[in-house]
Amino acid sequence: MHKLVITGGTSLEGEITISGAKNSAVAIIPATLLVDGPCRIENIPKIKDVKMFLKILENIGAIIEYIDDSTVIIDTSSIDSYEARYDEASKIRASYYLMGALLGKFKNARVALPGGCDFGTRPIDQHIKAFESLGAKVDIEHGLITARANELNGSSFYMDVVSVGATINAMLAAVKAKGTTVIENAAKEPHVVDVANFLNNMGANIIGAGTDIIKIKGVDKLPGGTTYSIVPDQIEAGTFMIASAITNGDITVKNIIPKHLESLSAKLIEMGASVKENDDGDSLRVKIDKKLLAVNIKTQPYPGFPTDLQPQITALLSQVDGISIITEAVWDSRFQYIPELRRMGAQIRVEGRIAIVEGVERLTGAKIKATDLRAGAAMIVAGLGAEGITEVHDLEIIDRGYENVEEKFKQVGAKIERVRITEMDY
Ligand code: EPU
């Protein structure tokens, strides 16, 4: 077990290269199940959730060749089991993609119910609605979800809530179904588009990803054999942009798609930060040269402000003069980290899905923990902006989704160390 020890108060400056997107990788890896040949995937982030997912595929018979730190070749063509009931599957939320992928491949799937960060209830009714609409019978028993069909037939369905997971799962299940499937009220996140691009690259026929209507014309086979590069992680990029703001810094995030970060850039500009797209078109510079102002934030599905940056921006606003109102409109319960920020002197009141942040002059270092992945990133951001030393515990949660987190922050000048936890820490 490790913790991060951060000495706050240094302005972060320099350039940082952003890794491939976690939430694309954890969907594209299971999507390879639908492909009949080897898939070379580049820009894979080196994070725990990806390692766990590759392990799950290996456990069910995939052949995986690790080419370098960010490239793998996955060949699932010899897999003949539609079951993924291993412990690992229940640990990561994205294991629900195995349902759509195995169902699409074998017309049969039996998968452990997913785990992941706890933001209150995390229903999968829209995933089930999509599978049933394609003709599958779905049952949940003994901690496993089973979906089976004699034949999958294209159909039209409307998602009652905008769900990234259900949209991607519906695409996975429909890609080889007979006829055309139409998903209405689809999620538009960059990773939805990325999965569609990956599948199209491998031979699928999906149009409209990135809009709220996606049409999938079923194909018999995805021959594969090509290379695909995962999009950059807009949440990792956003975390560094916010870290630049809280430290009055000057950070350039590289290897990104600026459009994916528009909602954050707009808010930072509203606060008084300078956010400039560089001429190369794939980097953004966030520079602070004046006092930042309080703003209100409401999380929404893409292209709205991402819930996965809500904890980090709340950490920033807790140190900005004035009152900011944060509304969490995606998850029921995503403020569990606020008591940790309060230990650092933050003045935040939570009322249901709303947090009222009264900015203080300066947070002060404290011993705090990562209550979930993005909350953990927010604790790092808070520690970097605070006066004195902050210890962030439960670091393993952050390793699930951030590659070499302390090394990357060191590259922009952070005073941050990974330290093994001793008995004294308990
Ligand atoms: N929802 C339903 N029924 C469903 C599915 C979702 O009611 O069948 C509700 C959820 O309860 C939630 C909302 O719809 O209120 C959105 O959930 P969504 O399905 O979009 O979330 P997800 O696919 O489970 C992904 C990301 C999350 C991110 C959300 C929202 C992955 C692996 N996870 O989760 O990322 O917060 O979309 O953008 O892609 C993270 O990276 O830290 C993370 C939690």
Image (tube, rainbow, N blue to C red):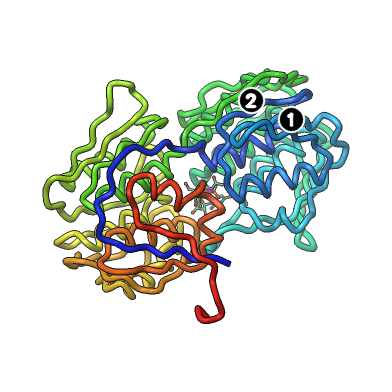
**Is 306 positioned to the left or the right of 79 in the image?**
left
Along the line of sight, the residue nearer the viewer: 120 or 394: 394
* Identity of the residue drawn at 28% across and 26% down: 278
Vertical arrangement, residue 202 with respect to residue 411, above or below: above
Q: Which residue is mark 2?
A: 199
Can residue 350 be seen here? The reply is no
Instruction: Check disc 1 and give the amino acid type.
Output: Leu
User: On residue 34, which mark appears?
Assistant: 1
**For disc 1, does the CB lie below 8 Å from ligand 1?**
no
Image check: 246 left or right of 195?
left
Q: Position of residue 140 (x, y in %)?
A: 75, 57
Residue at 42% x, 56% y is 377
Secondary structure beneath dot 2 equals: helix
- For the point 54% across and 71% down, which residue is it? 421
The one of 282 and 252 positioned closer to us in this rendering:
252
**Viewed as shown, does residue 234 lie left or right of 43?**
left
